[in-house]
């Protein structure tokens, strides 16, 4: 039987990807769409400036978009995917959880809250049980779970593997696609023929979220990983796909061959959207490239280039599709994990 799901912020860049991934989906059936007051009351076809590379699904185009308010969402919807601006999510996501909905959210609000699971299923699915702590503390029947920021999710699967050698220090420089800023995020006059060497708040997100994701959950709290992370984030004129240059130092010495083998051994989970192999390792030093490699495993794969030895560790490049594995697909995977773990 399908789980009835809704999308909060359904008309935006991530919301449209969510629609594309959810229709069709083997476990989920779209039953509610919400957006801002300016979209509410219109059909989805009218309200969304559809820019995803497949037509609006027939069953979705004529759904009337509702206001983003728990009273507007039918009670028989079990799971909500949220792609709201974080200022809006901060206010309304707890209201939905309090009203009994389970919310799988992309927005950055509350990602670091002690009682909110921040999850990449293939990396730290055990953190999902923080929901029990959350429900005890907040008295919610519903729940709020988060996926990390798109740049964080691109590097953390490979860092989780490297942690097998004792991760001590990570330095990362990103080349992030324009879709990561949303449709209205970066003007064409700013980004064409240009690189923007700063993305507000992004470096801090990479430095903190990665430590929470790789932390230890003891049944009541997550003790963050002790590694040092230093990030420098850049916006580049690609449409989709964040490419990142990573330098990592580990406690145990790790040869490039051993690291590549460990990357190749990292498997996905038995969830509909999880790839068989989490990390695709290229031998060619010219790969991964955003245009060529962002759609690996339907946009859910992590692509990694050849690993090189440095004076104190290893260096490699990694890439993920920022609106699929980095956003909408990450929320869908978390939804699949919630079903798998009987929270829904
Ligand atoms: N883009 C990415 O790659 C990416 C990756 C990871 C995380 N995220 C996060 O995901 C969230 C969505 O990003 P996006 O790129 O999809 O943004 P976006 O394109 O600007 O879409 C925002 C969505 O939220 C709705 N909205 C705006 N103000 C609202 C309000 N006051 N009440 C209710 N709904 C409102 C919009 O509806 P209208 O159309 O009616 O205005 C639209 O559906 C953000 O928190 C972002 O940080 C994005």
Image (cartoon, rainbow, N blue to C red):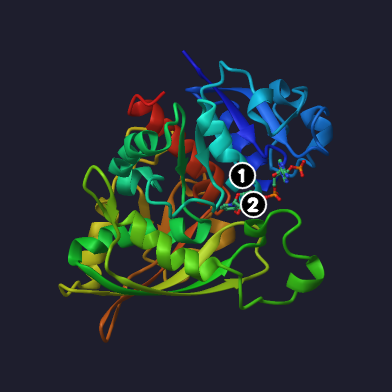
Quarter of the image for residue 281 reads: bottom left
- Residue hosting label 2: 87
The single residue placed furthest to the bottom in the displayed view is: 311
Q: CA distance from mark 2 to mark 1?
A: 7 Å
> Height in image: 23 above or below 52?
above
Q: Which of the pair 291/237 is nearer the observer?
A: 237
Is the CB of mark 2 within 8 Å of ligand 1? yes
Mark drawn on residue 166? none
x 78%, y 65%: residue:
187
Q: Is residue 181 visible?
A: yes
Tag 2–tag 1 contact (CB < 8 Å): yes
Q: Position of residue 79 (x, y in %)?
A: 52, 27
Q: Which mark is residue 91?
A: 1
Residue 42 position within the rendered picture, expressed as x and y whole percent measured from the top left: 83, 29
Residue 269 visible to an observer of this rendering: no
The residue that appears at 39% across and 47% down in the rendered structure is: 120
Query: Does residue 151 appear left or right of residue 283 in this picture?
Result: right
Question: Under tag 1, what secondary structure?
Answer: helix
Q: Is mark 1 within 8 Å of ligand 1?
A: no
SS for callout 2: helix
| Disc 2: CA contacts within 10 A as few (<14), some (14-19) or many (>=20) | few
Q: 88 or 300, which is in the foreground? A: 88
């Amino acid at each position: 039987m399908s789980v009835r799901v809704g999308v909060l912020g359904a008309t935006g860049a991530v919301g449209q990807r969510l629609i594309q991934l959810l229709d069709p989906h083997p476990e989920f059936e779209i039953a509610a769409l919400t957006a801002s007051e300016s979209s509410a009351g219109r059909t989805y076809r009218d309200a969304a400036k559809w820019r995803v590379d497949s037509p609006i699904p027939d069953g979705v185009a004529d759904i009337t978009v509702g206001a983003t308010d728990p009273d507007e969402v039918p009670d028989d919807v079990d799971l909500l995917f949220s792609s709201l601006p974080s200022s809006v999510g901060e206010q309304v996501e707890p209201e939905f959880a309090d009203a009994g909905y389970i919310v799988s959210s992309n927005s950055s609000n509350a990602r670091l809250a002690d009682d909110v699971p921040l999850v990449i299923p293939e990396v730290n699915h055990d953190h999902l049980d923080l929901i029990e702590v959350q429900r005890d503390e907040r008295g919610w029947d519903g729940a709020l779970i988060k996926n990390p920021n798109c740049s964080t999710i691109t590097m953390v699967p490979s860092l989780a593997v490297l942690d097998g050698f004792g991760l001590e220090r990570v330095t990362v420089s990103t080349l992030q696609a324009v879709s990561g800023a949303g449709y209205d995020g970066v003007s064409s006059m700013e980004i064409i023929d240009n690189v923007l060497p700063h993305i507000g708040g992004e470096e801090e997100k990479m430095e903190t979220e990665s430590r929470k994701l790789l932390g230890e959950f003891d049944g009541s709290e997550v003790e963050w990983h002790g590694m040092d992370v230093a990030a420098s984030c850049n916006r580049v004129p690609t449409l989709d796909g964040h490419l990142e240059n990573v330098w990592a130092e580990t406690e145990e010495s790790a040869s490039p061959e051993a690291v590549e083998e460990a990357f190749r051994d990292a498997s996905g989970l038995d969830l509909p959207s999880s790839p068989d192999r989490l990390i695709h390792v290229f031998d060619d030093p010219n790969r991964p490239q955003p245009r060529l490699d962002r759609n690996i495993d339907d946009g859910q794969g992590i692509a990694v280039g050849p690993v090189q030895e440095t004076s104190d560790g290893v260096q490699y490049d990694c890439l993920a599709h920022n609106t699929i594995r980095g956003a909408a697909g990450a929320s869908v995977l978390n939804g699949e994990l919630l079903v798998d773990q009987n929270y829904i």
